[in-house]
Image (cartoon, coloured by chain):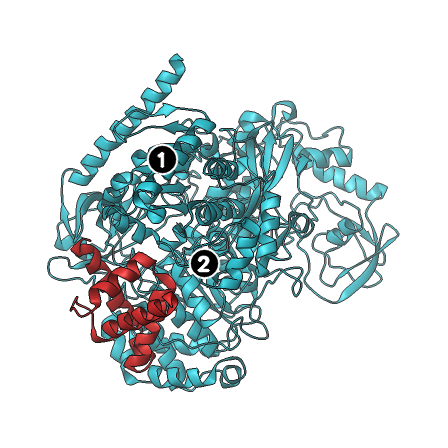
Chain colours: A red, B cyan
Amino acid sequence: MSASKLDRLVKMVNQIALNMSANGTDKMVADQVAQHLEKFWSPPMKNLITEQAAGADIGLTPIAQLAVQDLLVMQEAKQG
Amino acid sequence: MLEFYEPQADYGTPKSTSTELVTLSVDGVEVTVPEGTSVMRAAAESGVKIPRLCATDQLKSFGSCRVCLVEIEGRRGFPASCTTTVEAGMEVKTQSDEIAKLRRNVMELYISDHPLDCLTCPTNGDCELQDTAGELGLRSVRYGFEGENHLVAEKDESNPYFTFDPSKCIVCSRCVRACEEVQGTFALTIDGRGFESKVSASQAEDFMDSECVSCGACVNACPTATLTEKSIIEAGKPEHSVTTTCAYCGVGCSFKAEMKGNQVVRMTPYKDGKANEGHACVKGRFAFGYATHKDRITVPMIRDSIDDPWKEVSWEEAVTYTAKRFKDIQSQYGRTSIGAISSSRCTNEEVYLVQKMVRAGFGNNNVDTCARVCHSPTGFGLKTTLGESAGTQTFASVADADVVVVMGANPTEAHPVFGSRLKRRLREGAKLIVIDPRKIELVSSPHITADYHLPVRPGTNVTVLNALAHVVVNEGLEARDYIEERCDVPEFEKWLAFIGDERHSPENTESITGVPAADLRAAARLYATGGNGAIFYGLGVTEHSQGSTAVMGIANMAMLTGNIGRDGVGVNPLRGQNNVQGSCDMGSFPHELPGYRHISDSATRELFEGEWGVTLDSEPGLRIPNMFDAALDGDFKGLYCQGEDIAQSDPNTQHVEAALRSIECLVVQDIFLNETAKFAHVFLPGASFLEKDGTFTNAERRISRVRKAMPPLSGKADWEGTMALANALGCEMDYNHPSEIMDEIARLTPTFNGVSYDKLEQLGSIQWPCNDNTPDGTPIMHIDEFVRGKGFFAMTEYVPTTERANRKFPLLLTTGRILSQYNVGAQTRRTDNSEWHGEDLLEIHPHDAEERGINHGDWVGINSRVGDTVLRANVTDRVKPGVVYTTFHHPVSGANVITTDNSDWATNCPEYKVTAVQLSKVTEPSNWQARQKSFDKQQLGLLEKAQLQEAQG
């Protein structure tokens, strides 16, 4: 995995979070960002961001970080 | 549907739209017609043709030729039937000895100044003057031919597509009126008086040097051989015709492809085509020669490396080779290591097959389409707010608009036939607001001046839209009753609190957008209170990092003012390519099955799994930019690209080229060896729209038939090529005709349930949704309620792009299109349209040019953060200071060498419209241009080797 690959994904999540920032509370926005990622991102992209964000600062904004955590929960729920 | 050639029926004057009916008699036969109908048309509708020369049903009646005289009981004299409207009980007589004598007298005068060279005339057998002389029984001309005449008047052959031969002109003014009424350009006039009267282009200039836009409306209207297509002069009269749909822009004009055997000799706009109603533009009408251009590649080719010469092979060998390489790649790198890009220039049926092959054959959802890089934010934004990823109206609906907003679109250049329709409505008095960084033609053109031009700074559309909504809300101009009845009120209240904030006021945003606050306020008031308000927008809205937000902002404005759900209003995305709407409808996006249903929805998946006999992946696949990134990371190794030139059209060319070089098996299916094909390992020859059956769906959601006019030059239409590849991969497909593919689409897609080729034959075209609820289709959407139920006011926070001007890159580059060229130019560059636009130029404001010592015509180096290129300067005040502009129709221009990989937050649609650049005067091409030239030469050399080897056997 190249650093630039992760950087691109981080930039995208931060951008989505920023553009949704007026949609409600931080929690609501994070949920919506997570749903957006779940709906539009391919599994390798989702896996990479959730794996790399776990317990590490990869440059996500606080809301984006929260969203990625939500995404992880969604993925785990799907896997049962 | 093969039809023997005959001119389209002409009723003499336009149809009246009155609902009141009037009954009269024509030659003793009773006929009932709408009030306002001319006597000439009433006669035609009862089966009686009244001779005429200056009348045609595409133009208002004029009454100049005096050939259409009739007798009306109780009236004195012989009124002209074209300018006389029907009255109840009127008794009309169209034939009598006296009428015949009068008509013949008039014809004698015309013919006394007309060459008698009918047998060698290019329109012999297809000339209204000749026909009328025949109908009137003209046998002699008593005045002789020795008097003063115009028979030696010089021909104007300057236009590449038609000639103007004034010696054959009868000064009926049909061409002048067509230029005014149909096209709205006003390039032609009748110069002089009496005997000296003559048709003149602009100020007595050649057609080519005049303001003529070569739409062909004058040629279509001409009743003689005065204005004649050069293709007809060369080939003669067509012998049969095929009704089909244009393959250029998203207007989707209907045409008669007029043929001699398998050769197209003329494309005539079809009067019954509902998108164009008999009008056309220079591309659809004339630029069809690319279909048989010498550069066409008609034999499949393969090679192991892009440094190897191509080898011509059979279709079977090509698809077997491809299938093996794709399978090997999947075994080595995994199921998701291959994918496809479908084309918005191909038919619905072809696009459907590509996504089917990916999902059922590749076993993943790695399919995307060029709508990714143009209107994907439209899909997202309109689905979110209104519930359906499509425009809301018919084009004809603009005739009922009172206020028109054109935002980030340039209809007279990019959607010219709609542009003409719009101009007609504006001349009738509708108000116009243009929101665009440039002074597009609509801002000021003959008989049209925009009421407000808001010259938005590139990248700040969302701020302008928020400010417009802020004014409407702040001044209490919103449609409260509509919102309460039709929209989600709690969400609206939340949005109201957001938009009411003073930070959105025009005064507070003026410094961001560059739009004067007073103009913005006035424009908002006009849109909210001026009657029916219709918004038309284009890629100047979508191709931004906030493109989806801007689309939602537009939908918010329309709902806020109650401007959705009837004629004359609506939200209208002007689609770039002929089948952008259709390619999106057909499930080309990696997260959606046909009909915009998410791949994670198990019920929808089961429906397709049942039909296709496979298990589908429930997770979204890769979007085009993700494919490039994955290719560079070594995860994506095989790509099937049908009818798209991603190497030229996608942003950040160096990034795209590097990604294409990383792909182990790139398959390109196209009619030419385009820029992408130069990186390919397999070339499958494509078919032009003239060589296949299918359907296109235009920007109005109108599904229209594409009909085969000639056999595919490569032996296979594109759908047959895809089917061959799918079968080689073990994904069985067995369609005998595209109608069977449409039947499958209809079975699986609720919005297409009622669509079939039989119904298309019956209705001509159908606007989806078409199902049991709306068996004849849906011209206007969201009439009683929004597709999503209640309209949703989405929050539209403005997030500035990270692509900003600074001291190093002080100017903002934005890009667009020009009338004569289309998209990457692969088609139009191979026609005489290049006479109008042989190269892409850089528009720069005189102030910015002077500061840099740049003069008109100088070579200018353009540097951005990602690359540089060189173009010639066009110094003009069409752009405002601080903004530069270019088109992207020529590969050597490298417009996308400088655009960045910034993209829309929701859809990854590239931000083509904002690139910070610096300019400098230069004397030679950029390094990239030099490399491109050398690579191009190498690849064309490798192609020539293959063709030479084949020729030598």
* Residue B270, above or below B587: above
- In the foreground, B661 or B561: B661
Residue closest to the far front = A80
Image spot of residue B170 (x, y percent): 61, 38
Tell me the chain of label 1.
B
Q: Which residue is mark 2?
A: B592
| Among numbered discs 1 and 2, the one appearing first in the sequence | 1
Q: Quadrant of residue B263?
A: top right
Residues packed near mark 2 inside 10 Å, few (<14), some (14 to 19) or many (20 plus): many
Residue B15, by quadrant, is: bottom right
State left or right for residue B90 relative to residue B731: right
Image spot of residue B479 (x, y percent)? 49, 82
The x, y position of residue B673, in whole percent, is: 36, 33
Identity of the residue drawn at 50% across and 68% down: B570
Q: Residue at x 35, y 17 (%)?
A: B948
Task: Using the rendered image of the protein, determine whether residue B781 is visible from the camera's viewpoint.
Answer: yes
Q: Quadrant of the C terminus of chain B?
A: top left
Disc 1 marks which amino acid?
Arg
Task: Return the residue found at the far left.
Answer: B807
Compare residues A48 and B96 and report the one nearer the observer. Answer: A48
> Mark 2 falls within which chain?
B
Describe the element under mark 2 as helix, strand or loop: strand
Q: Secondary structure at mark 1?
A: helix
Camera-side residue of B64 and B305: B305
For this view, does B947 lie left or right of residue B189?
Answer: left
Identify the residue position indicated by label 1 in the image.
Answer: B325
Question: From what the image shows, is residue B490 above or below residue B646?
Answer: below
